[in-house]
Amino acid sequence: MSKKKMIILALLVALIVAFFAFDLGRFLSLDYIKSRQAEFTALAGEKPLLVGGAFFAVYVAVCALSLPGAAIMTLAAGAIFGLGWGTLIVSFASAVGATLALLASRYILREGVQSKFGARLADIDKGIEREGAFYLFTLRLVPIFPFFIINLLMGLTKMKAWTFYWVSQIGMLAGTLVYVNAGTQLAKISSLQGILSPGLIGSFVLLGVFPLVAKKIVDAIKARKVYAKWAHVKPKSFDRNLVVIGAGAAGLVTSYIAAVVKAKVTLVEAHKMGGDCLNYGCVPSKALIKTATLARQIRHSQDYGIAKASAEIHFADVMERIAHVVREIEPHDSVERYTGLGVDVAIGRAKITSPWHVEITKEDGSKQTLATKSIVIATGAAPFVPPLPGLEDVGYLTSDTLWGLREQPKRLVVLGGGPIGCELAQSFARLGSQVTQIEMLPRIMIREDEEVSAYAKQALEADGVTILTGHKALRCEKRGDVKTIVVESNGKETSIEFDALLCAVGRSARLKGFGLEELGITVNRTVQVNEYLETNFPNILAAGDVAGPYQFTHTAAHQAWYAAVNALFGFAKKFKADYSVIPWATFIDPEVARVGLNEQEAKEKKIAYEVTRYGIDDLDRAIADSAAHGWVKVLTVPGKDTILGVTIVGVHAGDLLAEYVLAMKHGLGLNKILGTIHTYPTLAEANKYAAGEWKRAHQPVKLLEWVGKFHAWRRA
């Protein structure tokens, strides 16, 4: 805390202490006001401006310092100045004083709270930005909520002071009128409890509920406006409760949940059940990584005490194994399985023709139109192909088309340094391809900490990948059978020859051909949804890659619950999608897994943190497995064991991360992990040892010194 803040805080504390030390509260008691009422009233009649101004100033000070007595002063205003002037003075004084309290709280406390609870505070600030004024107004209407607590808590948010002021003044007006009016009959009041009768409290509660009801009415009016163009086609009855478009992770889980709660649901898929994850992404890539890892282990057999080992790799067989793995898992996502679960599965192309109609064009060209109460768009994403001159001439692969290869490219160029590019570059290099990876940014895996990026680069280069960071792809060229890509770095152009080019520069949401634009659904790079996953049409929702903000299979499945429940039961209760604890992993060797904040994000968001680090090179099981490399890095709230984020680099990092995901989700700290028995010898012990490192750094040194002296005394 700065010196200036310390001085202001000390001054405020001194004023509050003086108030209680000198028993100034006796002047703000009901008995005192009643005993001096006639005197004050006469004085106000003689010098209205002076008395009114002094009363205003004292009221502002009481509110600003959060002192007890505001309610008594409101009664006094009615007794001294009458209903009209009393209400006017109190209305402005209370709003000004509350705003000063807000500003003091913000200036003195927010920075410290931000440093400890930055991530949570950011979410609150987003909510305040959207609907803060509305909720503040609701709180102000109900005087049973402590006046000063609202002021101080709002000071910790980013609500604008002017917004806080005018909302407070309007919102407190009803309560002010009640108290000032009661003050005009001060002689009849024996206690504050007598002012708010049960009936009056009930009236205030109803008054507080009114904005919520009004909001529902406003939302209904807005929805009616959105649907106005389509009102004439709204059916009187519906064929389905829900139609889900897309049978990837989000679509499968959404339709399954709908079937479990006995809704009538149709799942429409135009291509392959299981979506990208099963057919082109997670499953085939992990099968490839497994084979590539085995090839690497054979090549380095001496690490395991085997002097010499060799393997003959037939690339076509490798790719056939991958195809077999996909076929093995296919039944989990098949039409037959989901039909058995109660889902009506339609293979065909879906197009939304109205907010309640989905047209399905079957493979034979026939069409079927379903009337449905709700729709969930789960169309996923596709590899993004950059507009690179000459790319079409030389030909290219993506993470979708790669799996059709049966001849291994001798020279492979991978465009992109993200997770997909890194995983595939390392795998092909381990299988024997000469791989060059091109990344425009200064480092690969840019979302991770610099040390993680550097370690990943070192690991890929050790497997033979040539990594060119800070290189921008300019164009592709083809001369005869020779294919090249031209890149530029520091003003110098370089040509790189290749046999195959893999574009791995990201994925873009599938938005075309589903009737979204014709219907007027708001889209940008993704379908734009609110916190309930609703589009601008409340009965049309989106989940998974097409909705963002994450493009992970597990996030898509996570969103699916919210999409299904809000689509089917949103008329009664809606649930905001929770992204507070999202894990992810990059399956290079060693794996990189993360949940929550890493250091670079914490610094960007100015969130205070402590770092605890445990080197896996010290772990018994890792040493036994000849995998003693990597680390566990935990970010915690300074001085506490509360976990802000974890990054793990090492073998099976993605599996090890699960314990931290559970801990963060349920508010468990490192002490709980330290107190949990972990089987020996396992890699999971790394989590316990990381917690032990934190405990060692936070041991009570002074106390232990005294304990040592105690033991020495006992020995004597």
Image (cartoon, rainbow, N blue to C red):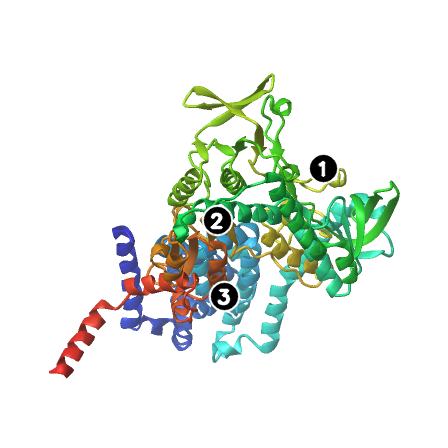
Local crowd size for mark 2, using a 10 Å CA cut-off: few (<14), some (14–19), many (≥20): few
Q: CA distance from mark 1 to mark 2?
A: 44 Å
Q: Label 2, on which residue?
A: 162
For the residue marked with disc 2, what is the amino acid? Trp
Q: Looking at this view, is 236 or 642 the one in front?
A: 642
Asked whether, in this view, residue 382 is left or right of residue 703, the answer is right
| Quarter of the C terminus within the rendering | bottom left
For the residue marked with disc 1, what is the amino acid? Lys
Where is residue 201? Give x, y as percent: 58, 73
Where is residue 131? Give x, y as percent: 57, 53
Where is residue 391? Give x, y as percent: 61, 25
Q: Looking at this view, is 600 or 432 the one in front?
A: 432
Ranked by sequence position, the earlier of labels 1 and 2 is 2
Q: Looking at this view, is 203 or 697 the one in front?
A: 697
Ranked by sequence position, the earlier of labels 1 and 3 is 1
Q: Label 3, on which residue?
A: 666
As drawn, which residue projects farthest toward the left? 716
Q: CA distance from mark 3 to mark 2?
A: 37 Å
**Do residues under tags 1 and 3 come within 8 Å of each other at their CB atoms?**
no
**Do residues under tags 1 and 2 come within 8 Å of each other at their CB atoms?**
no
Q: Looking at this view, is 650 or 268 the one in front?
A: 650
Q: Which mark is residue 573?
A: none
Q: Quadrant of residue 633?
A: bottom left
Task: Label 3: state its secondary structure.
Answer: loop
Q: Label 1, on which residue?
A: 512
| Quarter of the N terminus within the rendering | bottom left
